[in-house]
Image (cartoon, rainbow, N blue to C red):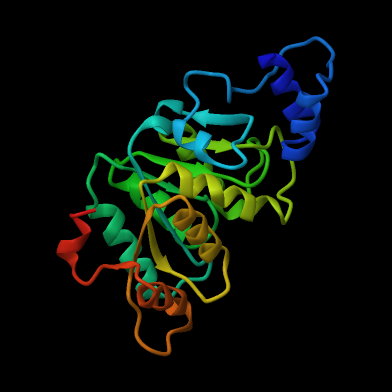
């Protein structure tokens, strides 16, 4: 059963619906082992938080240390095009948060990459959840970071090999970022962004959402201010960072 799930995930490039149908129909696959490092939904190592999802991933392809997946974690997320204020706040939050937490983000450019890099720079643990094949580096500007995290952190994906980064992968991926984290910290967000989709997933799962406030008129922080007005927790001084 386990091998069939892995082979279905590889054949259908991580497509959730097609894998589910293959399992339901008990589809048979040719013999041969997987060259991927994987954790399946049947394994003891599979993160318990993912089982709470409506669509828990059948297979997690990974690089690095999978033990991080079952440790306490917070997500740090935000815009791909942050202002200097958002960059500074991301570095300060990651560099000062409690070391018991693994820093989770999406290994995208902008706030995600800054959060991961600051975690590595301060010798913290970090997990990147990507929306393309586990062997595919995207975006290419994060190539060095990808290799660092493969060695010193952990990268996971529902998608095998070099599966392309298809548009619908990223909003679907966001549910994993939310589920793996006890708290979701937003350091930069416009009103319409993938960041807000991740926040919605976190709220659906009952996770605490924490935001950095922005000056009125700052478009890169409008999403943060909206969330604060709707009841999200707010960070107002450096002392708050150490409380996370």
- The x and y percentages for residue 98 are 22, 46
Q: Is residue 100 above or below residue 193?
A: above
Q: Residue at x 58, y 25 (%)?
A: 41
> Quick check: can you spot residue 15?
no
Q: Residue at x 32, y 60 (%)?
A: 91
- The x and y percentages for residue 140 are 62, 52
Q: Is residue 173 above or below residue 227?
A: above
| Closest to the observer, 167 or 233 | 233
Q: Residue at x 40, y 63 (%)?
A: 186
Does residue 93 appear left or right of residue 162 in this picture?
left
Q: Is residue 213 above or below residue 31?
A: below
| Closest to the observer, 38 or 70 | 70
Q: Residue at x 55, y 62 (%)?
A: 197
* Residue sticking out furthest to the left: 239
> Quick check: can you spot residue 4?
yes
- The x and y percentages for residue 110 are 49, 62
């Amino acid at each position: 059963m386990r091998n069939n799930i892995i082979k279905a995930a590889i054949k259908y490039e991580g497509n959730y619906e097609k894998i589910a149908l293959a399992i339901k129909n008990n589809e048979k696959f040719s013999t041969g082992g997987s060259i991927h490092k994987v954790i399946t939904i049947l394994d003891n190592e599979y993160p318990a938080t993912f089982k709470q999802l409506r669509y828990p991933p059948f297979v997690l392809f990974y690089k690095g240390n999978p033990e991080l997946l079952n440790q306490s974690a917070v997500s740090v997320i935000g815009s791909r095009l942050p202002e200097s204020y958002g960059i500074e706040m991301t570095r300060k939050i990651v560099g000062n948060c409690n070391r018991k937490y693994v820093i989770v983000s999406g290994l995208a450019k902008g706030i995600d990459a800054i959060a991961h890099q600051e975690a590595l720079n301060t010798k913290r643990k970090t997990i990147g959840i990507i929306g393309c094949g586990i062997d595919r580096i995207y975006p290419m500007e994060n190539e060095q970071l990808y290799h660092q995290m493969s060695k010193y952190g952990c990268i996971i994906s529902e998608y095998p090999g070099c599966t392309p980064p298809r548009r619908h992968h990223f909003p679907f991926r966001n549910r994993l970022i939310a589920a793996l984290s006890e708290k979701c910290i937003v350091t930069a967000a416009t009103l319409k962004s993938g960041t807000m989709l991740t926040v919605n997933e976190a709220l659906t799962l009952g996770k605490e959402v924490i935001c950095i406030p922005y000056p009125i008129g700052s478009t890169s922080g409008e999403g943060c201010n909206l969330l604060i007005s709707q009841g999200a927790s707010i960070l107002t001084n450096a002392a708050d960072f150490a409380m996370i």
